[in-house]
Amino acid sequence: MAERTLTQTALKHFRTLLDERRAETLVHLAALEDDLGVARQARAEGSADDEHDPDGPTMSQAWSQLSGQIVDVNAEIIGIDAAIDRIERGTFGVCVNCGNQIAKARLEARPAAEYCIDCARKQR
Ligand SMILES: [Zn+2]
């Protein structure tokens, strides 16, 4: 079921999707960085939480969780930027591994997808 390369209309559609997703992701990142700022301040002030609630999540656990989320969100933005770049270079929707067309349904769900479903499965 070889699909034709994407039409200009489809490319415009995915460009819009990517721009929207990028904007949402930036908002998400800003919120995470705010939270991290709060955690950083609490840590700088010497958090008493760690001693009072040894079974609860500690400040440093919250800290590393937030840092991990920020890394993920940053990676997502890089992925979105790369996809926008592929639109501009005319290689959007082509699997970077095997060169096959990525299914449109997959791009609808994950417009920043680099791999076709088969290659994505092999990556894991
Ligand atoms: Zn592939």
Image (cartoon, rainbow, N blue to C red):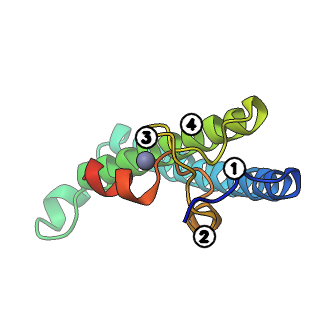
Q: Is mark 3 within 8 Å of ligand 1?
A: yes
Sooner in the amino-acid sequence: mark 2 or mark 3? 3
Q: Secondary structure at mark 3?
A: loop
Q: Could you tell me how far apart the alpha carbons at marks 1 and 4 are, in whole angstroms? A: 9 Å
Q: Count numbered badges in the picture.
A: 4
Q: Could you tell me how far apart the alpha carbons at marks 1 and 2 are, in whole angstroms? A: 19 Å
Residue 120 position, x and y percent, is 37, 53
Say which quadrant the N terminus sits in.
bottom right
Residues 25 and 99: in front is: 99
Q: Which residue position holds label 1? A: 22
Q: Amino acid at mark 1?
A: Arg
Residue at x-position 78% and y-position 33%: 88
Mark 1 vs 4: CB contact within 8 A: no
Q: Is mark 2 within 8 Å of ligand 1?
A: no
Sooner in the amino-acid sequence: mark 1 or mark 2? 1
The numbered dot on residue 98 is 3
The numbered dot on residue 108 is none
Mark 3 vs 1: CB contact within 8 A: no
For the view shown, which residue lies furthest in the front direction?
1
Q: Could you tell me how far apart the alpha carbons at marks 3 and 1 are, in whole angstroms? A: 26 Å
Q: Secondary structure at mark 2?
A: helix
Q: Secondary structure at mark 4?
A: helix
Residue 80 position, x and y percent, is 62, 44
Q: Amino acid at mark 3?
A: Cys
Sooner in the amino-acid sequence: mark 4 or mark 2? 4
Are there few (<14), some (14-19), or many (20+) residues within 10 Å of tag 2?
A: few
Q: Which residue position holds label 4? A: 78
Q: Is residue 75 left or right of residue 25?
A: left
Sooner in the amino-acid sequence: mark 1 or mark 4? 1
Sooner in the amino-acid sequence: mark 3 or mark 1? 1
Q: Which residue position holds label 2? A: 105
Q: Could you tell me how far apart the alpha carbons at marks 2 and 3 are, in whole angstroms? A: 18 Å
